[in-house]
Each structure stands twice: as structure tokens, then as C-alpha cells.
Amino acid sequence: MMTMTAGKFEPEDCPPVLLIEDEFETAQEVSLFLERQGYAVRIADSIQQVPDAIRLHSPAVMILDRMLHGTDVLPMIEAWREQGNYVPVLVVSGLSSVDDRIRGLRAGGDDYLIKPFSLEELIARVEVLRRRTADARISVLRVGPLTMDLIERVVRRADRELDLLPREFELLEYFMRHPNLVITRAMLLTDVWNFKTLPQTNVVDVHIGKLRRKIDGPGEVALIETVRAAGFMLHGDR
């Protein structure tokens, strides 16, 4: 039986993550990867360990394996939400049907990642959830030459004002909240278009194409890169 353990280090400036996972090897692999990215990780392998782990660790994000020892723990998320616990939850599961994903999100999960998954995508999704809360009160975003005033709804690249349609504004805002990270099409369909299921569509590529033509003027460096077989990345260092 795996016991609840602290990470190898837990300095105050490391965002705390509670990893609720009953597969020992998976828990160790994910924990080690998160720690290398600067997170302080605590592992719980059973429902019984979770309340104390939340109380002692105050996680910024929770990563929850949906099936713990054969039990579906979505009701636990529903109970957390009813009790006023709004810590972001990333549900991970081998249950991959559309209905399964919808149930996970409707139960109160903030995101749903299907096993097996890449650790890079996992960390990207954790970053999204963490920053979604941390950046909620920011009114001006700045990434490289881009500036976005969220109140005035004005976007500039250096001194040039960009004329963006509402969806293009939302899309660019998402990228600017997650610069230098690979953003998958699934993440954009879920978080920008608010799809609860993932349709077969090229809508993301079409809108990114339009956005690129507006933010990259003649002779300017392209800011949004297509990452082959992964998604897109907004570079903040160009």
C-alpha cells in the first residue's frame, strides 16, 4: 500500500499539487516530473487520505485519478464543490468515452485528461488551471511585443493596434495567459470554444490562421508557432 508522502522538497515558493493516484509507478513518475518543474507534490492513494492532505497541504491544483481502487470518485468532487472547495481539479482517467468526459466535467472537474497521457501535456494543463485562478484579477497582459487591455478590450503589437473579432480576442488572451507553453487543439476547443465534447473540426486552425495574419505584420517575426503533432505555442521571447 502506498502511503501519503511529501515530495523531496517543499519550499514555500513551489506551487503545491495534490496527486491522488493509486497506481504506485504512475504516482512516482508524475510526482518526479512535477517536482522537476518546480512543484511541491504530495501523494494520496486513497479517498481516506484526501481530507488530511487538503488540510495540511493547501494544494493550488489537485490531480485526481478518477478510479481509485476500483471506485469512481466523481461523487467526491461533487461533494467538494457543494462544501465550497473550489481548488482546481484535473481528472485523469482511462475512461475515455464522450459520456465519461462529460460526467467528469459536470461533476466539478475543471479539466479531463485521458490515460495514457504525455507528461508534457499534463504539466501544460496544470499550468492552465493554476494560472486561471492566479491571473483572474490581472487587467493588462503583456507577452513580448503584445499588450492586451482586458478592460478596454484593446490589443497592440508594439505601437500598432490590432483589430480583433471577439473570438480572436479570446483566443489570443488564452495564449497570452500561457506563453511559451504548448497549447493543444483540445485545450482550445474546451477552454475557448467551451466544447464539452471534442468535435472533428478545423475551427481552431482557421481562427489561428486569421489571428496570425493580424498580429504578424509585414517583416515582423511570427509569434505563434505550430508545434508538430502537439499544438501551438505563443513565444514571449521573440
Image: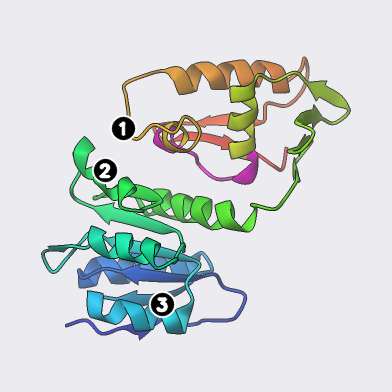
Q: Of helix, strand and loop, which one carries label 1? A: loop
Q: Element type at marker 3? A: helix
What residue is disc 3 on?
Answer: 54
The three-letter code of the residue at mark 3 reads Ile
Asked whether the residues under the numbered discs 2 and 1 touch, taking CB atoms below 8 Å apart as contact, a structural biologist would say yes
Q: Position of residue 33 (x, y in %)?
A: 41, 65
Which one is earlier in the sequence, the residue at label 3 or at label 2? 3
What's the CA distance linking mark 2 and mark 1? Answer: 8 Å
Quick one: quadrant of the N terminus?
Answer: bottom left
* Mark 2 crowd level (few <14, some 14–19, many ≥20, 10 Å Cα): many
Give the total of numbered labels.
3
* Residue 158 is at least partly visible in this image: yes
* Left or right of 237 in this view: 43: left
Marks 1 and 3 sit apart, C-alpha to C-alpha, by 30 Å
Q: Residue 216's quadrant in the figure?
A: top right
Q: Work out whether residue 157 or residue 110 is closer to the camera in this orientation and state it.
A: 110
Alpha-carbon distance for marks 3 and 2? 24 Å
Image location of residue 168, percent across then percent down: 62, 24
- Which residue was labeled with disc 2? 101
The residue positioned 63% from the left and 23% from the top of the image is 166
Residues at circles 1 and 3 in contact by the CB criterion of under 8 Å: no
Q: Is residue 43 left or right of residue 70?
A: right
Part of the protein shown in magenta: 176-187
Residue 197 marker: 1
> Seen in the image, is 41 located left or right of residue 233?
left
Q: Quadrant of the C terminus?
A: top right
Residue 78 position, x and y percent, is: 31, 59
